[in-house]
Image (spheres, rainbow, N blue to C red):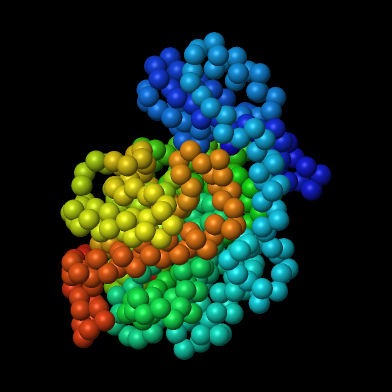
């Protein structure tokens, strides 16, 4: 992450930082920015410079503007400036953030909320809907914060959906969308929403990375990683820390990089404890679907991420994903694209999606990259007025995923008389990479 100035309240500031979108059209262009990335100081890369004919976003500190301008002009590098003063965007976002001490009864989806308020709302929901909702504490983060979620269940023997939110701290639309969908499943009177609410069990963990999420509110709006220190640098990319082709591609061994994979698989207590919870509950809770919510790029992705090998139900996941993005588009016209992560964006390793698919044999696995588009000037600062539209269109896509997978037999006779256990079976000989204890 690039260095930035620090305000009087010890918050990182990005005054006059610019965001460039570059087109690296030659080998020379690629080498220039590979060297710049090694410096780290004053440049923040959104992605790595890896290939010729690549488009790449880079945030540049104010005092480096003359330098980057010279480099771009001298080498005839095509570029556009997406943002001229990144701090202005952060300042404009402040009005959409409710204070940490806000009354939980004011919780809604036209603002962003601190971690404490989200957790208080989950507790309130469990009290208000005590017959169908219970709070689950998986463990604690590196800084001792709860790894808190809820289970929603209207009747026994349902197949289950697991919703992962907020694995990257700065992606605020992810926890907001997760909580919005949970609320819709509890309160909507629409027949189609009531059907999926009552015929699947739901696990919601809106904030997988509570340390990073809280830090992005209190100290650095652009913080992505966890908060465990490694030498002079802090944090691991929690979506590179899972034991599936760990640190092989699309992840960094450098603790100062934004996609640092950690010193070993499951080095982060958050990843280790969520993996243990999933391993211990995948069969007993009949978890058949795993949905990970990220931002941004407007993509619906499925495994694999680290190899061009096709998953065994590739055709099904592609067909389901295509129908899901069409359903999403029908709501507000938002354009998504579906495909395997490896084929659709860039290879990466150590992500939660690939791990649950391969280690736990969960057959329906998708990652949403929510609004906005790849060339968005909002990036991770999606305006709060887009939370509800994002939630509604995402819910429509999720409904389609479940119903289409149901048609293909992944859940048995859901909504009829079956127990939801047919389809691809969970392996009985699954071996976890660590000792499993009680949840």
**In this picture, is 126 found above or below 297?**
below
Instruction: Report the residue at 20% width, 47% height from top.
Output: 310
Q: Looking at this rendering, what residue extends furthest in the right direction?
A: 8
Report whether 169 appears left or right of 399: right
**In this picture, is 311 found above or below 120?**
above
x, y percent for residue 37:
52, 27
Residue closest to the eye, 313 or 193: 193
- Residue 421 visible here: no
Report whether 2 appears left or right of 298: right
**In this picture, is 138 found above or below 264?**
below
Residue closest to the eye, 210 or 181: 181
Q: Looking at this rendering, what residue extends furthest in the bottom direction?
A: 131
- Residue 73 visible here: yes
Residue closest to the eye, 339 or 35: 339
Q: Dividing the image into 4 quarters, which one contains the N terminus?
A: top right
Q: Looking at this rendering, what residue extends furthest in the top direction?
A: 74
**In this picture, is 276 found above or below 125?**
above
Report whether 234 appears left or right of 311: right
Instruction: Report the residue at 66% width, 18% height from top.
Output: 66
Q: Dividing the image into 4 quarters, which one contains the C terminus?
A: bottom left
Instruction: Report the residue at 20% width, 57% height from top.
Output: 316
The quarter of the displayed image where residue 434 is located? bottom left
Instruction: Report the residue at 49% width, 61% height from top.
Output: 389
x, y percent for residue 224:
55, 47
x, y percent for residue 217:
66, 54
Number of callouts: 0
x, y percent for residue 157:
29, 82
């Amino acid at each position: 992450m690039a260095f930035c100035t620090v305000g009087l309240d010890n918050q990182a500031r990005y005054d006059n930082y610019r965001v460039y979108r570059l087109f690296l059209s030659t080998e020379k262009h690629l080498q220039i920015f590979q060297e710049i990335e090694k410096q780290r100081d004053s440049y923040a890369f959104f992605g790595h410079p890896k290939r010729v004919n690549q488009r790449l976003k880079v945030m540049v500190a104010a005092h480096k503007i003359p330098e980057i301008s010279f480099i771009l002009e001298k080498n005839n590098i095509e570029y556009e400036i997406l943002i001229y003063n990144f701090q202005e965007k952060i300042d404009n976002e402040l009005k959409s953030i409710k204070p940490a001490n806000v009354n939980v009864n004011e919780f809604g989806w036209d603002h962003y909320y601190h971690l404490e308020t989200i957790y208080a709302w989950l507790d309130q929901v469990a009290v208000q809907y005590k017959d169908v909702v219970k709070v689950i504490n998986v463990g604690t983060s590196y800084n001792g914060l709860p790894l808190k979620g809820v289970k929603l269940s209207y009747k026994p023997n349902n197949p289950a959906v697991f919703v992962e939110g907020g694995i990257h701290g700065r992606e605020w639309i992810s926890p907001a969308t997760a909580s919005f969908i949970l609320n819709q499943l509890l309160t909507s009177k629409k027949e189609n929403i009531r059907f999926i609410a009552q015929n699947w069990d739901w696990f919601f963990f809106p904030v997988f990375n509570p340390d990073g999420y809280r830090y992005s509110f209190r100290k650095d709006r652009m913080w992505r990683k966890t908060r465990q220190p490694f030498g002079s640098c802090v944090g691991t990319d929690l979506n590179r820390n899972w034991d599936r082709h760990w640190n092989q591609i699309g992840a960094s061994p450098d603790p100062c990089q934004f996609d640092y994979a950690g010193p070993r698989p499951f080095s982060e207590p958050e990843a280790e404890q969520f993996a243990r919870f999933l391993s211990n509950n995948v069969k007993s809770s009949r978890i058949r679907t795993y949905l990970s919510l990220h931002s941004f790029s407007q993509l619906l992705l499925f495994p694999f991420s680290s190899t061009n090998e096709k998953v065994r139900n590739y055709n099904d996941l592609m067909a389901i994903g295509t129908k899901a993005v069409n359903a999403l588009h029908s709501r507000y016209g938002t354009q998504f694209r579906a495909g395997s992560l490896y084929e659709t964006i860039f290879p990466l390793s150590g992500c939660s999606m690939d791990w649950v698919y391969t280690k736990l044999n969960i057959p329906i696995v998708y990652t949403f990259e929510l609004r906005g588009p790849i060339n968005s000037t909002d990036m991770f600062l999606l305006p709060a007025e887009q939370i509800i539209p994002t939630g509604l269109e995402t819910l429509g896509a999720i409904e389609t995923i479940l119903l289409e997978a149901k048609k293909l037999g992944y859940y048995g006779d859901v909504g009829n008389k079956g127990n939801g256990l047919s389809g691809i079976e969970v392996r009985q000989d699954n071996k976890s990479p660590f000792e499993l204890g009680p949840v």
